Image (cartoon, grey):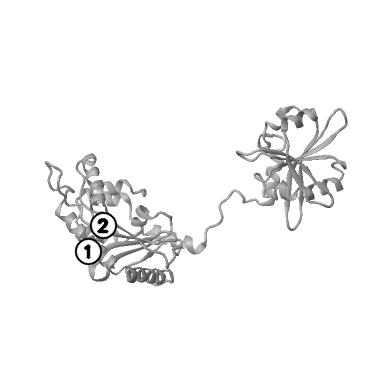
């Protein structure tokens, strides 16, 4: 039977050692102790890594007798183990897997004793919570934000244009120049759509691509391998499909945007090494505080990319209005797969649906 069940707390300047200790004895007078690891509830050295010091301290304090069997019990989420521990004087400590049912039978313990996890113990958990709070009152709070990162985030948020404002412009069939004027005031809107790692980006407008002209917007993002996304914007003053009866052709303005991106793709791949070198050169300038091409540096303040690795280039066109989303989504999908380079095509209606801001 279990004759003692308590939380052991012994901390020094180097280690925190907390565990649940149960002392058991059977009718034959055999005594054992079970050390249950509670490091998932409180910052502590695991029982496995501190079993010797726990045993010695309990022995010194007179909380357990000498020459008793020692068992280690782990009840971590999704994992449980029960092992006998041997702590010899001259050799290394040994752990041997032990059948819990046989243990309960030997020490005349109700098997339910180990079915209920410590976190369900109404007597012990308040004590554990108090120890955890004393150890670190803010352990369940996120770390305070970096002040420089937070400042950049607030500056960006102050200049953000709302989804409702854009929607109003789209409903009024805004022209390309009207949309460009507004979008250039808040480049973060493109990061919201196309960045994989939040806060890690650099956005540009009117970004030159060699002798192939300027891209309306360019986005640097990614980790390890940098991704450069070229975005061409057309107005909301035309329908995506020119042939309303057959849905066979796109508007001429989409063809123009495709040609613009195709020319830039040609330049990039004819001058690939120089292009990569130039992109990383521009990235470093912005990260070091210089503003080029209306650049907007994300809150993180840098990209965690390797300048020695290849750059992935992606292409996006946003333009026109949707009339039949079901029909046109298939056409846009085919457009992406059939164009060279592959170009992701969005109407203003489909693009706004993916925008998460209010």
As displayed, is residue 114 above or below residue 226?
A: above
> Along the line of sight, which residue is nearer the eye, 353 or 67?
67
Q: Secondary structure at mark 2?
A: loop
Q: Residue at x 84, y 40 (%)?
A: 68
> Along the line of sight, which residue is nearer the eye, 116 or 98?
98
Q: Which residue is mark 2?
A: 341
Q: Secondary structure at mark 1?
A: helix
Q: Which residue is mark 1?
A: 263
Please state the horizontal and vertical placement of residue 206, each as a whole percent of the image: 27, 66
Asked if labels 1 and 2 touch by Cβ distance under 8 angstroms, the answer is: no
Please state the horizontal and vertical placement of residue 297, each as a whole percent of the image: 40, 64
Relative to 310, 45 lies left or right: right
| Mark-to-mark CA distance, 2 and 1 | 10 Å
Q: Quadrant of residue 307?
A: bottom left
Choose the circle earlier in sequence order: 2 or 1: 1
Q: Residue at x 27, y 46 (%)?
A: 350
Label 1: how many Cα within 10 Å (few below 14, some 14–19, many 20+): some
């Amino acid at each position: 039977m279990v004759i003692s069940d308590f939380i052991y707390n012994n901390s020094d300047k180097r280690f925190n050692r907390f565990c649940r200790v149960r002392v058991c004895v059977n009718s034959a007078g055999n005594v054992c102790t079970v050390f249950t690891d509670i490091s998932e509830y409180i910052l502590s050295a695991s029982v496995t890594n501190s079993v010797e010091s726990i045993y010695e301290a309990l022995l010194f304090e007179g909380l357990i007798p000498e020459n008793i069997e020692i068992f280690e019990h782990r009840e971590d989420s999704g994992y449980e183990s029960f092992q006998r521990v041997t702590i010899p004087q001259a050799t290394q400590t040994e752990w041997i897997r032990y059948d819990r049912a046989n243990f309960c039978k030997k020490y005349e313990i109700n098997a339910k004793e180990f079915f209920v996890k410590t976190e369900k113990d109404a007597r012990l958990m308040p004590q554990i919570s108090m120890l955890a709070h004393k150890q670190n009152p803010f352990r369940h709070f996120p770390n305070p934000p970096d002040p420089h990162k937070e400042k950049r985030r607030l500056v960006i948020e102050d200049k953000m244009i709302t989804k409702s404002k854009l929607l109003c412009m789209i409903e009024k069939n805004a022209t390309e120049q009207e949309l460009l004027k507004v979008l250039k005031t808040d480049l973060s809107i493109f990061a919201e759509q196309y960045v994989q790692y939040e806060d890690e980006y650099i956005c540009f407008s009117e970004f030159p691509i060699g002798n192939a002209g300027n891209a309306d917007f360019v986005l640097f993002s990614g980790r390890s391998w940098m991704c450069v996304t070229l975005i061409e914007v057309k107005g909301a003053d035309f329908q995506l499909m020119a042939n309303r009866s057959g849905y066979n052709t796109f508007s001429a303005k989409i063809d123009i945007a495709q040609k613009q991106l195709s020319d830039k793709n040609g330049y990039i791949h004819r001058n690939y090494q120089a292009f990569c070198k130039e992109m990383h050169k521009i990235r470093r300038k912005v990260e070091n505080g210089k503003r080029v091409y209306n650049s907007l540096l994300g809150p993180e303040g840098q990209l965690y990319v390797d300048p020695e690795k290849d750059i992935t280039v992606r292409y996006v066109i946003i333009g026109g209005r949707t009339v039949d989303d079901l029909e046109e989504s298939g056409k846009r999908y085919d457009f992406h797969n059939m164009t060279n380079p592959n170009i992701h095509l969005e109407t203003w209606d489909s693009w706004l649906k993916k925008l998460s801001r209010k």
